[in-house]
Amino acid sequence: MSRIAPSTITTKSGAPLLLRAPEPSDYDSYVAFQHQAATETTHTLQIPGRIRPREELVSVWRNALSDSSVESFLGCFSGNTLVGYCGLHPDRKEHPWVRHVALFGMIILKPYWGQGIGKELLGKLIQHAQLMGIIRLEALVRVTNERAIQLYKNFGFEIEGTRKKAALIDGQFVDEYFIAKMIERTP
Ligand SMILES: CC(C)(COP(=O)(O)OP(=O)(O)OC[C@H]1O[C@@H](n2cnc3c(N)ncnc32)[C@H](O)[C@@H]1OP(=O)(O)O)[C@@H](O)C(=O)NCCC(=O)NCCS
């Protein structure tokens, strides 16, 4: 049972979509999703054709369903097809002093950009982070990724600094912003 409850949303163009945790049977759809995302945008670090082994990914998804896990995944599905995906991850330094810190990432397939899916997914992730006691939620975003920057600002994220020359894309260096949002504790 997912700790982020499944829900249905309607896109701006009227399409019904389901938000829910990924299940083992979604693996093939995830592989296709990952490949498409890697080829249609330079805003992520997905690699075309890089296939994460089924057992490894399914195990990560399964572990994320445990009540004590900050790590969490949420997919956006059109029928059985994965069209959006996001993840919340605990700070990888795994020290008690940074237990209140989490990172997130999100990707939506290009044909679905601008339909309000990012807003729905991020809203759910923030709610879940708050329930898990996360105080600081952070991410990296390329300075050229205007849509993502606007989405994050809409949710109260602030730009804290710049990671210069963070990527070299088609011969051009691109900077990244460190962005973060402080989350109030649940009363
Ligand atoms: C960035 C991304 C996650 C945003 O998701 P999305 O579903 O397209 O975003 P939404 O439709 O929910 O739009 C959210 C907000 O972004 C802003 N926005 C939308 N289109 C925009 C555009 N063309 N330029 C600037 N801001 C834009 C709007 O403020 C919008 O909110 P509103 O509809 O309430 O006005 C998605 O486009 C994506 O996956 N891109 C490729 C991968 C990526 O960049 N991942 C993030 C890496 S940090």
Image (cartoon, helix red, strand yellow):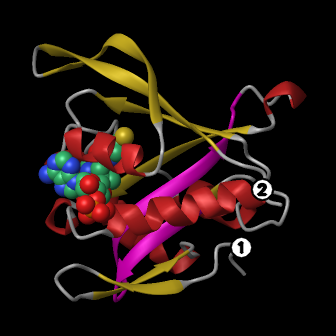
Examine the residues drawn in magenta and state their main secondary structure.
strand
Q: Which residue is painted at 55% across and 66% down in the image? A: 124
Up-down relation of residue 19 to residue 96 (above or below): below
Question: Compared to 34, does 90 lie above or below?
Answer: above
Q: Nearer the viewer, residue 186 or 97?
A: 186
The residue furthest right is 96
What amino acid type should be assigned to the residue bearing mark 2?
Met
Return the residue nearer the eye: 127 or 22: 127
Q: Amino acid at mark 1?
A: Arg
Q: Quadrant of residue 76?
A: bottom left
From mark 1 to mark 2, how far is it between C-alphas?
10 Å
- Judge by depth and name the residue closer to the eye, 80 or 78: 78
**Quarter in which the C terminus is drawn:** bottom right
Question: Could you say which disc has been placed on residue 132 in the image?
Answer: 2
Instruction: Describe residue 133's horizontal placement relative to residue 125 as left or right.
Output: right
Residue matched to label 1: 3
| Residue 137 at least partly seen | yes
Q: Dividing the picture into quarters, in which one does residue 121 lie?
A: bottom left
Tell me where the magenta segment starts and ends, as one range.
73-92
| 151 left or right of 61 in image | left
